[in-house]
Image (spheres, rainbow, N blue to C red):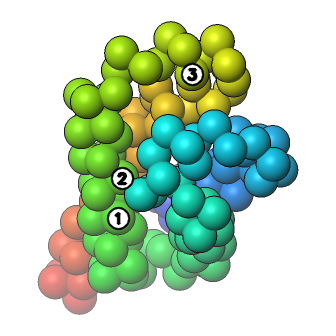
Amino acid sequence: MNHTLIKRGFLLAGLINLAGILLVTQGLSSPTIMLADPAVFSGFGVVMIMLWGLAYIGTAAVAQHAVLLPLTFALEKAAYTLNWVFWLDSHSAQLPAILEQDWLGGAFLAAYGINDGLFGLFFAAVAIRNWRAARLD
């Protein structure tokens, strides 16, 4: 994994968090995801997701050397992925109604864990790569 790929991966993760949450919430005006999972997607939770996005973007320039930051991001993405799995397990029957009411919000709830899981694996791979490189120096 080269420096350019790492930097672009962090930038992409950040942009997805920022633009994605604004798109899904229709500029923070749609309450669909907030009502469906208020523990994670409250107004405060949505703002925190955007702040995580800024953290990814801010880390992009130094990500090829960092170990703890990408590891922290991997753990954060694991938490969101696990929450998604548990939410789907107990709320999947509600998804058709949510999709009918708000297709974008419903699609997000049906799939956001896949995105978070993939970026979690990316962040973990960067942390492992950088840890190994630091041990060799």
Q: CA distance from mark 1 to mark 3?
A: 26 Å
Q: Does label 1 or label 3 sit earlier along the sequence?
A: 1
Residue pointed to by mark 1: 76
Residue pointed to by mark 3: 98
- Looking at the picture, how far across and down is residue 82, in whole percent? 25, 46
Q: Are marks 2 and 1 in contact (CB under 8 Å)?
A: yes
Location of the C terminus (image quadrant): bottom left
Residue pointed to by mark 2: 80
Location of the N terminus (image quadrant): bottom left
Element under label 2?
helix
Amino acid carrying mark 3 in the image: Ile
Label 3 CA crowd tier, 10 Å (few <14, some 14–19, many 20+):
many
- Looking at the picture, how far across and down is residue 49, in whole percent? 56, 63
The residue sitting at 35% across, 20% down in the picture is 92
Q: Is 71 left, or right, of 99 in this rendering? A: left
The residue sitting at 35% across, 64% down in the picture is 76
The reply to whether residue 36 is in sight is yes
Amino acid carrying mark 2 in the image: Tyr
